[in-house]
Image: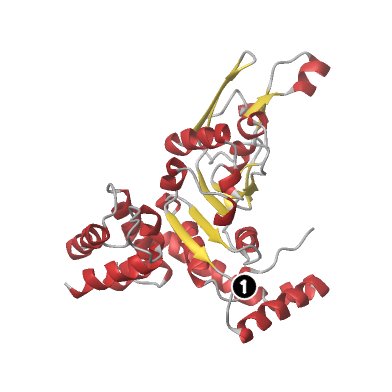
């Protein structure tokens, strides 16, 4: 089995790690977009999540990761098998992938061998109840983007082709990464991501040395390196599990709701999706910290990631979106 670099061993990139942990606790936050320089642990962090996520209960042979007690899909009731615990899926969606591979298609092998018309589930089925990761998401072909937007909006994949008619749940946390120098993201897809974080090459020499030291140690002896970080990983896994159980009980006061709206208005965020994301992310952050309610500091901590990509472009403002967020937060919290 190929070992992944341990999540707790990633040096720095705190905002990216915070956003991914929030998505683990509160999938309704809407996914995470990670944009920045190449070689800054974007893919490493996403793939390391698989080692942190609590297992899910599903049927042994179910390709859709259906929850126990859910309705059978496509007449698969007889082949589902017993209820078992499996790792939460983290599925890669590669560039150049075909539409059939994403949504599923006719099982050609079964059709040729047995003359049966059967459905072969795609990547969306495998990602159900887990994570779907797209590296270089800004280079994804338009027709695949349109498809993902439809499924993300409904939480359901509908396939009507080759005489097949299949409908199955496809609820996943979408995580995309990319380098902005290689192209921008379509506004429709950008708006679908709940959180957006920026990663950059570290400028501190000690920081850089530690990154190289740990990566080199992992590549020389991955087994020993992973064992060294196993305890830290177990603690983080327990923290996520506890937060998942706590998050639904977190209270949201009227004062917090008002401040969330004040922040969005101060920043000029379009629509109300920013406020909803802000509250959900702050609630998950509170759960991760073991709090019983959302504080203003929780709002402040998650506001940059929740609102950065929702700001209107101002051609007269040369400051980046992060600087505008900081200015807006300072104004909102000074009021």
Residue 168 found in image quarter: top right
Residue 98, position as x, y percentages in the image: 67, 32
- The answer to whether residue 295 shows anywhere in this view is no
Between residue 204 and residue 245, name the one nearer to us: 204
Please tell me which residue is depicted at 54% across the width and 45% down the height of the picture: 129
Which residue, as the protein is rendered here, is positioned at the far front? 316
Look at the image and tell me whether residue 123 can be seen.
yes
Q: Residues within 10 Å of mark 1 (few under 14, many from 20)?
A: some
Residue 121 falls left or right of residue 333: right
* Element carrying mark 1: loop
Using the rendered view, name the quadrant where residue 50 is placed: bottom right
> Residue 220: x, y in percent?
82, 74
Q: Quadrant of the N terminus?
A: bottom right
Against 208, is 223 above or below?
above
In this figure, what is the number of numbered marks?
A: 1
Residue at 76% of width from left, 73% of height from top? 218
| Residue 333: x %, y % from top left | 22, 72
Q: Is residue 59 above or below residue 22?
A: above
**16 left or right of 275?**
right
Question: Observer-nearest residue: 222 or 243?
Answer: 222
Which residue has dot 1 on it?
10
């Amino acid at each position: 089995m190929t070992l992944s670099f341990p999540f707790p061993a990633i040096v720095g990139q705190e905002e990216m790690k915070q956003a991914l942990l929030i998505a683990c606790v509160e999938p309704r936050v809407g996914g995470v977009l990670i944009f920045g320089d190449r070689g800054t642990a974007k893919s490493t962090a996403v793939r390391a999540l698989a080692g942190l996520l609590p297992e899910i209960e599903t049927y042994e042979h179910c390709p859709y990761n259906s929850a126990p007690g859910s309705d059978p899909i496509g007449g698969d009731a007889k082949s589902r098998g017993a209820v078992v615990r499996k790792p939460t899926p983290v599925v890669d969606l590669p560039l150049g992938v075909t539409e059939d591979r994403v949504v599923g298609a006719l099982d050609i092998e079964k059709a040729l061998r047995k003359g049966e018309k059967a459905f072969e589930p795609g990547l969306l089925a495998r990602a159900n109840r887990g994570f779907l990761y797209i590296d270089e998401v800004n280079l994804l072909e338009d027709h695949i983007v349109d498809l993902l937007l439809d499924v993300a909006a409904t939480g359901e994949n509908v396939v009507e082709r080759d005489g097949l008619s299949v409908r199955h749940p496809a609820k996943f946390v979408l995580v995309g990464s990319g380098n902005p120098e290689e192209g921008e993201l379509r506004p429709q897809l950008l708006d679908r991501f709940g959180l957006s974080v920026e990663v950059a090459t570290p400028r501190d020499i000690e920081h850089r040395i530690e990154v190289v030291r740990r990566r080199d140690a992992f590549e020389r002896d991955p087994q020993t390196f992973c064992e060294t970080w196993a305890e830290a990983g177990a603690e983080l896994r327990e923290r996520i599990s506890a937060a998942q159980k706590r998050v639904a009980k977190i209270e949201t006061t009227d004062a917090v709701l008002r401040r969330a709206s004040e922040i969005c208005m101060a920043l000029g965020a379009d629509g109300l999706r920013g406020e909803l994301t802000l509250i959900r992310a702050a609630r998950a952050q509170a759960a991760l910290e073991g709090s019983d309610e959302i504080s203003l500091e929780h709002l402040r901590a998650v506001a940059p990631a929740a609102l950065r990509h929702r700001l209107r472009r101002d051609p007269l403002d040369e400051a980046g979106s992060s600087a505008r967020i900081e200015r807006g937060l300072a104004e909102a919290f000074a009021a």
